[in-house]
Structures are given as C-alpha cells and as structure tokens.
Amino acid sequence: MYGYRHQSFNNVYFKKQVPSNVQPLFDVVREFCLSLGENIVEDIRMHRVVFGKSITFRWFADVEPEREGIIIKIQKSRKEEPQILQIKVGQEITELKEIIKNAFERIN
C-alpha cells in the first residue's frame, strides 16, 4: 500500500495536462517515487505532482509533464538548490531513478 495522497491522481483535469505520448514515462516515474517507502506523500497540483516524505512533507521530487517528456526537480536537502532535469520520452531513466532514490534517502 502506498502512502498518503492529497488528491486522486485520476483527477480528470490533471490527466488532461499530460500528453498521451508522455503518460507512460510519467507513470513509470510516479510509480517509482511511490515505491520508495510507506511514508510517501503524493501531492497533485495544478500542473505537476510533488512527492514528499512523511506528513511533514519534505519534498524530494517535483514532476511536471511537457509536450515531449517531463521536467523533474530533485531536492536532496533544504539547504541545496534543486537539481532540474529534463527527460524526453524514450530516454533511459535508470540514472534518474538512482538520483531520485538518493534524494529520498537524504531528504530530512
């Protein structure tokens, strides 16, 4: 069972924001973030989804769909600037998963 969610990811308005060609990539990143632990908070915002750790919501990933992929901001520490990555549809995401996992483990 995954962690707490503020809104349903099936929110029709948000789903319309994600281009159909980007949806599979978006889903893989989303499911990976949710799989990192029981204490994951998923916050569906107007144009993006933010993933945080526990109810104190120390965010570690902010995922926003684009026409050809996603923009993801990675927060490893509140004292560091977020790392911003642009991932295109079809791009290998093994390294991205490691970066997200590392941010999840380091954020406090």
Image (cartoon, rainbow, N blue to C red):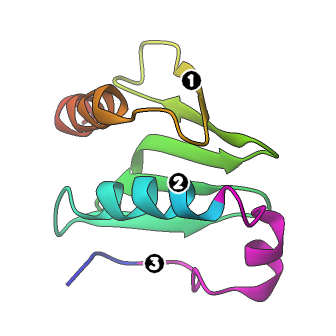
Residue designated by label 3: 5
Specify the quadrant of the image occupied by residue 97: top left
Q: Residue at x 52, y 13 (%)?
A: 81
Q: Residue at x 36, y 64 (%)?
A: 31
Observer-nearest of 94 and 63: 94
The outermost residue toward the front is 90
Mark whose residue sits in front, 3 or 1: 1
> Looking at the picture, how far across and down is residue 39, in whole percent?
22, 65
Say the numbered circle drawn on residue 100.
none
Residue designated by label 2: 25
Residue designated by label 1: 85
Q: Amino acid at mark 3?
A: Arg
- Circle nearer the N terminus (1, 2): 2
Q: CA distance from mark 1 to mark 2?
A: 14 Å
- Circle nearer the N terminus (3, 1): 3
- Segment tinted magenta in the rendering: 5-22
Mark whose residue sits in front, 1 or 2: 2
Q: Amino acid at mark 1?
A: Leu
Q: Residue at x 17, y 36 (%)?
A: 105
Q: Where 79 falls versus 9 (above or below)?
A: above
> In the visual, does 35 lie left or right of 62?
left
Q: Quadrant of the C terminus?
A: top left
Residue 49 in magenta stretch = no
**Crowdedness of circle 3 by 10 Å Cα count: few (<14), some, many (20+)?**
few
Residue 16 in magenta stretch = yes
Could you tell me which secondary element the residue under label 1 belongs to?
A: strand
Q: CA distance from mark 3 to mark 1?
A: 24 Å
Q: Where 107 falls versus 31 (above or below)?
A: above
> Looking at the picture, how far across and down is residue 53, in whole percent?
30, 53
